[in-house]
Image (cartoon, rainbow, N blue to C red):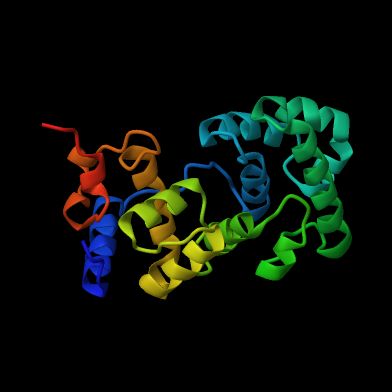
Amino acid sequence: MRVTKKIKEEQIRILGEVYKDTKPALIFRNPFELLIAVILSAQCTDKRVNVTTARLFQKAATPEAILSLGLAALEEEIRDCGLFRNKAKNIMATCQILCEQYGGEVPADFAKLQELPGVGRKTANVVMSVGFNAPAIAVDTHVFRVSNRLKLAAGDTPLAVEQGLMKAIPKDKWSAAHHWLIWHGRNICKARKPLCGKCPLADVCPTAIDFQPSP
């Protein structure tokens, strides 16, 4: 199947129709809590992160409070998130910068976000999109996989896929489409065993036939 502009538009339409009511899986109350949650989500499930942040934010929910908590105590609070020592180090350093340079607030600036320890392009895009309602597309493993399988935006790197999605999807739908692709990857287009037989996009997916069971 050759994925034309018309097919991509249909893919986007179906995704929007199926996942229009989805919301971010991470639980947060403000951009700072979102930032910390996304840092913790690396190689960790959103469900586990939500358990961890619910406990952490009861004790420390601001950059100042986390600095007062101290590195050792922070490590204990986030231990069950995996890679906790490195994450704790980055969170402490990020909180220090937020306090010293931004008055304890998270900057609503993509470039400044990427300068924070533990914050890469994906995390910065999530914070801009979800925390500040700015048009952005964050490419995680789900978005990367689904985009390539649909050929909605094919690429060998997250940046290439991000750039392809920005061309394929209208700008006013970037942030929403990011969530549509994530939920589709979690629910249907799974890494090892995609559920092509149940997929609403099967008729407009060039790789669906590859995953169909033999008769």
In x, y percent, where is residue 197?
A: 18, 39
In x, y percent, where is residue 52?
A: 64, 30
**In screen coordinates, is 2 left or right of 51?**
left
Say which quarter of the image contains residue 81. Answer: top right
**In screen coordinates, is 210 left or right of 131?**
left
**In screen coordinates, is 29 left or right of 184?**
right
Image quarter where the C terminus lies is top left
- Residue at position x 16%, y 33% in the image: 214
Q: Nearer the viewer, residue 143 or 126?
A: 143
- Residue at position x 81%, y 64% in the image: 102
In x, y percent, where is residue 181?
A: 38, 52
Say which quarter of the image contains residue 78. Answer: top right
Tally the marks: 0
Q: Is residue 215 above or below residue 101?
A: above
Viewer can see residue 109 = no
Q: Is residue 142 above or below residue 51?
A: below
- Residue at position x 23%, y 66% in the image: 2
- Residue at position x 53%, y 68% in the image: 134
Q: Is residue 94 above or below residue 135?
A: above
Viewer can see residue 61 = yes
- Residue closest to the far left: 215
Image quarter where the N terminus lies is bottom left
In x, y percent, where is residue 31?
A: 63, 55
